[in-house]
Amino acid sequence: MQATQQSETRSSRTTEHNTRISVSGECIAVSCADCMTETCVGKSCGRVNRMLVRYVYSFLFLLSLLVAWMIRDYSDKILSKFPTFRYCRGEHLCLGSEGVLRVSFGCFCFFFTMYISTVGTQKSGDFRDLWHTGWWPAKCMLWILFMVVPFFMPPTSIKFYGEVARFGGGIFLVVQLLAVLNFIYWWNESWLSDKNVQQCQMPMLCVSLGCFVVSILGVTMMFIWYAPHAYCGLNIFLITWSLILIQVMTSISLHSKVNAGLLTSGLMSLYIIFLGWSALMSEPVSATCNSKPRLNGRGDWITVLGFLLGIFTLILASFSTSIEPRSISFQKDEDETSEKLPYGYGFFHFVFCLGAMYFAMLFIGWDLEQTMEKWNIDYGWSTVWIKVINQWLAACFYVWTMIGPLILKHRDFS
């Protein structure tokens, strides 16, 4: 009898201990559970197929990106035999840049065709809905056609597309930035909801402080690696300005009239440092202030890992920013009905159009006159300044989301 009571006491203590441990897990998993619930809304989880279709389009986009990479680094002999590549005279940089732009143009044409044929679709059962979710043999043949045709187009047309791709790639960065902001606020609101606010206080504090600690550590390492000398004025300015942006954003977020909280400012600080670090890493190898230059060659595992990480983040950004138009909007749609589709097809494909332009700029370093060596991606002074401007825009947009409702009191920023 006494042994039974001791066993029940130990069991009770174990249950309480496990309950306390699971609080943080519940905070992290609650949003995923909500997403799964939303996915299975309707008759027989009718939205599941439409949501899973996005993965197929993401695979085609990834396949296009890998084709561009292979053509840039390993197709010199093949491309030199094409009549449209004769003016390159067998030069590797010219052939690689041209090949990337042509694959990017084919990918852009495929998703632009899908955009034209699906934009405005609002209800299930529409022919455009069936076209978006089905007809895969026809769409695969269409994708292959768009991958081949650009290689027979005149160079002047591809050069013009390259100039347009610079602008489109910049727009993609802005869309990606707004999606990051939307995700940060969504995370903050999810943990501050009435049902989670009590159990998520400690995880929120830990995540916020962790973000600030990593941000300060990142600033310190950037000073050590990318500003080792007093004459490195540009790098010192960029790193110092990143620190100033963090201080300004945090001060505004903690103001009594704003009260945005530590979590949003902590996550944004981490994102600001990431953009600043990425910009400094993109400096050319010849830069005297870069004590941690990129190493070239397939044997450099850091370069290989960075290359694969760049591809992954590009696909993830294209996917996350393409869920629906309201993901980058400050105003909610007040006329939502159960008959509407789970995401906007037209906007989905439009973002992939921009993504096709963006990956072309990654592979050629935003410079149409030259491309990068094997196993390198996204470096050069053009890339550096693109990332710096993107960092400044990120800070400006975040500050505006905090002070905008105070300045324009009659506008709906919900």
Image (cartoon, rainbow, N blue to C red):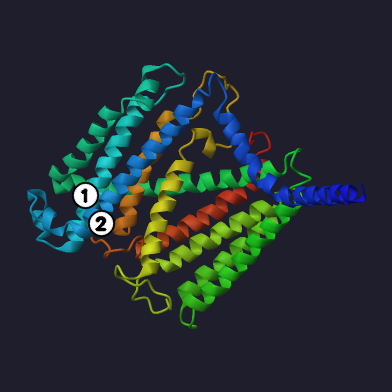
Q: Amino acid at mark 2?
A: Leu
- The residue beneath circle 2 is 368
Residue at the front extreme of this rendering: 1
Q: Residue at x 37, y 48 (%)?
A: 169
Which percent across, then down, holds residue 244?
A: 60, 65
Q: Residues within 10 Å of mark 2 (few under 14, many from 20)?
A: some
Residues marked 1 and 2 touching at CB (< 8 Å): yes
Labelled disc at residue 381? none
Looking at the rendered structure, the secondary structure element under dot 2 is loop
Looking at the rendered structure, the secondary structure element under dot 1 is helix
Task: Report the side of 35 relative to 120 (left or right).
Answer: right
129 or 56, which is in the foreground? Answer: 56
Q: Is residue 231 above or below residue 328?
A: below
Which percent across, then down, holds residue 280?
A: 44, 68
- The residue beneath circle 1 is 159
How many numbered marks are there? 2
